[in-house]
Structures are given as structure tokens and as C-alpha cells.
Amino acid sequence: MTFPVVRHAALTSLALAFTSPCALADSAADTAVAAVIITAARAPQPSSDVLSDHVLISATDIARSGAGNVVELLQKQRGIEITRNGGPGSASQVFIRGGDAKQTVVLVDGVRIGSSTIGIANWATLPLANIDRIEIVYGPLATMYGADAIGGVVQIFTRRGAGAPKVTAAVEAGSDKARSMAFGVAGASEGENSISYAFGVSKDKDDGFSTTKPGNFSYNQDNDGYTKDSATGQLGIVLAKGHEAGLLYLHSHLKSQYDAGPGPFDVRSVQNMDNIAVFSKHQITPNWKVSLQASEADDKSVNFSSATSSNRIDTRLHAYSMQNDIVLGSDLLQLVLERRVEDVYADTTRALNTGRATNSVAAAYSLKRGNHLASASARRDDSTQYGDKVTGGVGYGYKLTRALRVNASAGTSFRAPTFNELYYPNYGVDTNKPEHGRNVEGGVYYNDGTLEASAVWYRNRLSDLLVNTSKCPVQLETHPNGCAYNVDRATLEGISLGARTRMGALDMSGSLDLQDPRDDTTGKSLQRRARRHAKFAIEYSAGALVAGAGVQLSAKRFDDLANRNTLPGYGLVNLFAEYRSAPDWSAVLRLNNAADKQYETARNYATAGRQVFAGIRYGIR
């Protein structure tokens, strides 16, 4: 890719980030310095030592984001675009650095989630009220997490207990008859055998609006709402000094309406997400720690398209892992063994009723010597369906000063074919191979405790891209209308800029992504991904009052692979205010899409206009 105008703009924006405090910014100095990232290396690291490009969304960021759900929260982050087929309860996709939604791994408290048939996480079922923080790590992390970590990894952490018991609660109501309630309690006992606990429940209900617009073959002018009931739980116990065990749980039940053409029947889907995990951690010696985990993640969906027709698809993932962290002076050696078993049950599409198992072994070494940081990792995944895949990665960073660091890295990755791409009748081909990625990137990072700024260039070359072909190259008799097949190559290249700072009572943040996600086979832009998108936010604190505004900008995108149908660019303005009337009590008000912008993230699917929400919170900061 060559775009001198874009590169010139990137250098100009980077200069502004360092020289103009009002250009970009966002967080308090103590938060920036103390940030710890777990996802990048599967172990806690100070943010200043993490070689992978990343973003941390803290509990305070979530509370003041003005977002009503996880998708809206992610849409505000650097390097991320989203599409949604209607309102908050509708099917959603999250694109990282121009990659496909299926090229992202999503974890909840270390448990991998997602449907094996369509290959993406069910974002709409995730309960925002029960989330403590989110880590986004950009770029390939296949050596850490195996298949599908091409564009990046999103890990969601639910609340954990510590200290004296603490109660949190919130109620909110707003446009489209939206209402939500949440309650949680968390804490820990004292003593040698301390028990920690955290439990939360939430309910969201919204009458919504029509998910489709005129021109969509499924259009129905009725409102399409949703109801979501969720519960999370964590329980841990210190068995002895250096030894602990625990249990994690998440349940979410989502009923959402959608359009399937005119008619009186209540077309809807019922979706359930259930995650459960047991874990233990053991400090065998002062420099050797062993972590064990066994988990099950269930993704169940039933679609009711008529009074006599329904379709059920269930995905169940079993995972087992053992991780050894061995400290060697200032270095860390990690050895990981994993097994993942995927099973699918479909009551009508029986060709999908199959499974696969993947056994994995990985090793990683992180080095820290004065101003030098380095890492090297390798992994072998052995699948009963697609065979052996070996991935690797290396990274290097050098601290020019205490605040300024440069990074460079390279890594390989792959995406496993979904069960639909393999077995769906008249579409899947059982000989389809995994997609492959080869990524290189370099970055400059600055953090003096008050100002954070970063500029990252990346190029990820993809081969054996799985696309929908109009004429199937194989099995023509059973695929007369095309199929999923490995025919394309693509390049994801771009520059990602971000900065955050605090100036007195003002917190400011901003990001700019200049990218060129392109199908190298056809020369066309990849579907629904813009070449430019940006986010800016400013927050003002004055005593008990906090108020802020955020802007999201996106250039035009194409809704189809042929680039014939254009989705125009758009800009959104969101406003937020919080007034703390007592140490634990606060009132919140948010105004989303304040300018009532009419826009689309998917052609002929509706998005929300101007919306206002008000609520009361207790114990949430």
C-alpha cells in the first residue's frame, strides 16, 4: 500500500499529539502509570513493559463512557469499527485494525467465547453492568491464544471481590422505553484462608425501533426490542500461602426481535450464553508458578421465524489449560499446554452436527535488561480437522528515556474455518483450509505520567482468505450457487494514532486510524471498513459534577465486496453528565447522537437517532 497523503497526515497528527495539549488526551496520571495488562502475555505486566499495542478500558472509563452496551463501548475505542443489524439486541460485528470479525479472539475472564458455526462472539448477550474492565490487544496473538487471533484479542474481566463487602446498584431509563437495573455485591474475608466473592445481576429491556429500513427485503415497520437477563459470579479461596482456587460463572439470556418481512408473527431469537470455569494457582517455588483452568462455554440460539418454524444451533466449547510461569531474574519463561474441544448441535441443519479437538503447546520468553525489552514465542496447534499449525512471534522495545519507547515486532497467525464454511449444505466445503496472517509493525510510545501518546504502523498480509465465491471451484454438483473457498489474499495496513492527557479539570482523549484494508485479489476495499475513522472526547470535573462530550467520525465504507454499494461517512456527538450527591450516590444523564444523525453501519439496517437516558447509581465510581 502506498498513500503519501495518509502518511503525511499521520506524521502531522503525531506532532500535534506531542506539541498541542488540546489536540488529544484522556486520563489521570496515576491511572496511566499504574496500569497493568494481563492479556498480552497471559500474565500481569506494567503497561510500560507491554510490547503489543493495547488499550485498557477501566471501570471508571466504563462508568463515564455514556455507552449502554459493550458494542457501543468498543465503538469508542482506537482501531475498532463495528456493524450492527439494528438496535442494541441485534447481531453485531467488531472489526479490529481492518480485520474481519472472525479474526478476533474474545475472552471473558480467560474463557474463550463465540459460535463455532459463524465464528464470532455474540456481543449482544454480554452484560455491560457486570464488567470491571476490558483489555484490547492489537495484532496477532496466535502464540498466546491459538486460532483466530489475527486482528487482536478482546478480554473482558467481570468484577472480583476484595476488602470489606461492597454493594453496587444502578437503575436507568430512557428513549424507546429503555430501562435497566443492576445489583452487585463483592468482598473478601480476612485471615490465612481468605474467601473472596463477587456476584452481580442485571436486567435490560428496550422496546427498540425497526431493525430494517425500506429497501431491505426483510423490512417490517414494527418496533424490534429486546430483553436481557444476566448474572455473573466469582468465588475464590486461599488454600494455603501461595495456593488458591476458584470458580467463575456468567449467564446471559437474551430475547431479541428482528424483521423477516411483513406479517403479524413476533419474529425473534432467544440466545443463551453460559460460561463456567474452575481454576487453581500454585506457587511451587519462589520463581515457579503453575496455573490450571478447566472451562465450558455454551452459546445457544433459537430463531423463531414463524408460528410453525424454528431453528436451533448450539455451540459448546470445553477448554483445559496448564500454564507455567518461571521467573529467571528479570526475565519470564512461560510454558503452556492447552486442549480445546468444539461441538455443534443443530436441530434442522444436521450437517453441522460435528466437532473438532485442538491440542496445543506453546512457549514464550520475555526479557528485560535495563532499557531493553524483548520477547519471543512459538506455538503448535494440532487439530483433528485442519491438522498442524505452527505460529511464532518476536518483539523488541527500547526505552529512549523513561517516558519514550520505540517498539518493533513480527508474528504469524491463522484463522480456523468455521463450521458453516466447512459443513453448511450447499455452501461449506470440508477441505477448506485455515487463513494465514504475517504481521509486522513498529511503534513509538510516550508516557510521562500526565501525557500518553502513541503512533503505530502495521502491515498484516493474509493468504488463503475464505470468501463467498459466485462459482465454486470444487464440488460443483452440490454447490451450484457458489461456496466458501480459500481464493483471496488481503493486506491490512495502516497507522493508528492515540493520545490522552489531563489539564487541570479537563481530561481529553483522541485517536485517528488511517488504514487500507484491501482484497489483493480484486483490488477492492474490504466490506464495511473505512479507510479513516477517529474518536475524540473531553471531560470536565468540578467538585461533585463531571460532564463530558465525545465525537465519533467515520469515512465512507462499502457494504459489499464488489464496492458497488456505498455507506456514507458519518459523525456522532454524545454527551454525558454525572452529579455525585453523596460519596456513594450519583445521578447520571447521557444524550447519545445529540445531532440526531441518520447513518448506517450495514446497508438498509436502522441505527438509533437522538436518545436520552437518565439514571441513579449507588457505589459505582
Image (cartoon, grey):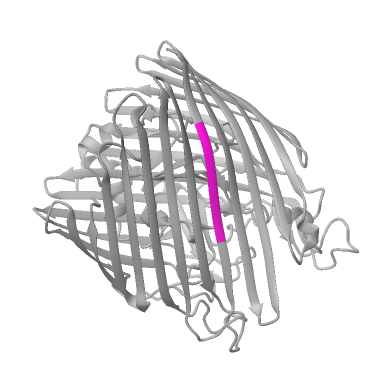
Quarter of image, res 122: bottom right
- Which residue is at a point 52% across and 69% down the rendered structure image? 255
Is residue 28 positioned above or below 444 on the image?
below
In the image: residue 307, left or right of residue 101: right
Task: Name which residue lies at 54% across and 84% down.
Answer: 214
* 20 shown above or below 313: above
Q: Position of residue 4 (x, y in %)?
A: 45, 47
Image quadrant in which you'd find residue 373: top left
In the displayed structure image, the side of residue 320 where residue 471 appears, left or right? right
Point out residue 242 in the picture as x, y percentages from the top left corner.
Answer: 41, 20
Residue 217: % across, % down: 62, 81
Look at the image and say whether residue 110 sits in the magenta stretch: no
Q: Main secondary structure of the magenta part?
A: strand
The part of the chain drawn in magenta is: 272-279
Q: Residue at x 41, y 73 (%)?
A: 206
Does residue 278 belong to the magenta stretch? yes
Q: Nearer the viewer, residue 455 or 606?
A: 606
Viewer-closest of 602 and 297? 297
Q: Nearer the viewer, residue 238 or 350?
A: 238
The answer to whether residue 460 is above or below residue 555 is above
Task: For residue 417, say whether it is visible.
Answer: no
Q: Quick check: 407 left or right of 469?
A: left
Residue 302 visible in this rendered orientation of the protein: yes
* Position in image of residue 216 (x %, y %): 58, 80
